[in-house]
Image (cartoon, rainbow, N blue to C red):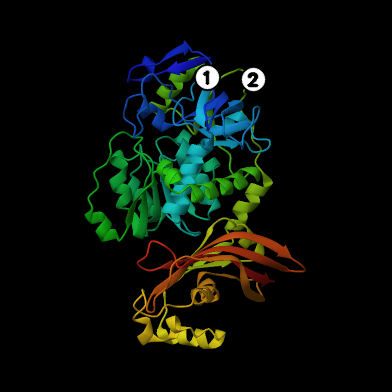
Amino acid sequence: MKALLCKEFGMPDTLVLEDLPALKAEAGKVVISIKACSVNFPDTLIIRNLYQFKPALPFSPGGEVSGFVKEVGEGVKHLKVGDKVFAMTGWGGMAEEVLVDARRVFPMLPKMDFVTAASVMYNYGTSYHALKDRAELKAGEILLVLGAAGGVGLAAVELGKLMGATVIAAASSDEKLATCREKGADFTINYTNEDLREKIKSITQGKGVDVIYDAVGDKYAEPALRSIAWKGRYLVVGFAAGEIPKIALNLALLKGCAIVGVFWGQFAEKEPAQNFKNIQELAGYFMKGSLRPHIHKLYSLAEAADSLNDLMNRKVVGKAVVVTSDEVQMPKYEVAKASQQEIKTVAQVSKVGEMLVFKDLAALKSHIGKELGTSDWQTLTQDKINAFAAATLDDQWIHVDEEKAKLSPFGKTIAHGFLSLSFSPKFMYEMFKVESAKMGLNYGTNKVRFISPVPVGSRVRMKATLKDVEEMQPTGAKLIIDAIFELEGSEKPACVAELLSVVYE
């Protein structure tokens, strides 16, 4: 098999294309016959020994591939020979074959082509984690994307629109900004010939931006941070423009803002369950046609070094992809009606204070997979515990006998597990409402797990995500809500639950 090898650290022109023996599967791993490998900014760092991960020489760059499973190692159960897959390999992708841990390999979606499959995980995984988990971007907020024409930048523009934000795209040329507008950007800034700070001030009427997605760093970081709104979130995604900026921390103090790091690779390793949930949600967007990567150009394996040079010289708009045969062609995307309808529906979601306001059930459905918000804190006083004990006839001494409870391991009374859960209707009323609703019922849970005891005097709050909306005849819908009941001062929540609620129009 052929592979583009880094045999000494240096620029792309030091890479060499060589013939190597075919790879063999190992326990827990699979060999993938590669059809496409996308080109990402870390690839330009890893060949110069500047990246966090440092493979032993020689190696092939390329960390995001698609193709067929050629051989399956011992113990691998979820994959078989011939499966069409995509994978996050770290490196090794600019070759005809790669050996990869089976846990990092995923089945391709139905009807998805190889070029698209190799172009989604890094860009959309990074940007969705950044906007959803780190920034907690909310509908109606203003999002500024620096380096908006790059792979992760364009993904952030698309996702920001789907999440209901007003998106300002900033890039270095009018050509790049035209692509950003095609992806849904509401406003654009050419920071080569426009003053970034003054333009942001003009667009936002002096209010500033709520979230900054910064994949470029360098000289653009400080004027962007000076343009952030009160309690804004500055996402540190990368430094594609060159220099790692030195931020004056007094700006964070003056703006009351958060400077938040985004390292999707570590997130995927340390929080695999949440990462898998994000992947499932992204898969839903792709299946509906709501997301489509912008493919800049296809390069042959012999031209792979050119793709890295083009990326380093900022010539790439969207995604450069290396393909291993002429059979793999540039995908042709149609603008999906469902995608346009979804974007239109998102506009029917507004915000009053911290409350999300949905115009109707259609608007609510557009919010599936997104956060509903976080409630205010609720203090569990002894009076509340006593009242709950009386109402439920559960008056065990650990709940109601304050003197005896002092001798317990907790040193005080603890609340009933279901007491925290019982606040869910109040919490949901604080988070959202549906304007068209004539009646709403909060009627139970699908499942619940109590994790931490809640001593008297503790404060709890609920963080909720809309998992699904199921139609109910004649004019209603059942809401399925993933809820985490956070316990102040504790890393572990009081409980987690899948809540059920019904809304009738």
- Give the x, y percent position of residue 153: 45, 41
Q: Which mark is first along the chain, 1 or 2?
A: 1
> Left of 406 or right of it: where is 478?
right
- Give the x, y percent position of residue 295: 54, 31
The total of numbered circles placed on residues is 2
Using the image, determine if residue 142 lies above or below residue 103: below
Q: Nearer the viewer, residue 490 or 263?
A: 490
Disc 2 secondary structure class:
loop
User: Furthest residue to the right?
Assistant: 474
Q: In the image, what residue occupies the spot 49% across and 43% down?
A: 125
Using the image, determine if residue 185 lies above or below residue 333: below
- Residue 315: tell me if it is visible: yes
Q: Are marks 2 and 1 in contact (CB under 8 Å)?
A: no
Disc 1 secondary structure class:
loop
Q: Nearer the viewer, residue 126 or 106?
A: 106
Instruction: Specify few, some or many for label 1: CA neighbours under 10 Å numbering under 14, 14-19, or 20 or more.
Output: some
Amino acid on which disc 1 is placed: Leu
Instruction: Specify few, some or many for label 2: CA neighbours under 10 Å numbering under 14, 14-19, or 20 or more.
Output: few
- Give the x, y percent position of residue 12: 38, 19
Amino acid on which disc 2 is placed: Glu
Disc 1 target residue: 23
The span from disc 2 to disc 1 (Cα, nearest Å) is: 22 Å
Give me the disc on residue 327: 2
- Residue 384: tell me if it is visible: no
Q: In the image, what residue occupies the spot 42% across and 79% down?
A: 380
Point out the frontmost of discs 2 and 1.
Answer: 1
Q: Nearer the viewer, residue 469 or 296?
A: 469
The quadrant the C terminus occupies is bottom right
User: Furthest residue to the top?
Assistant: 19
Using the image, determine if residue 275 lies above or below residue 70: below
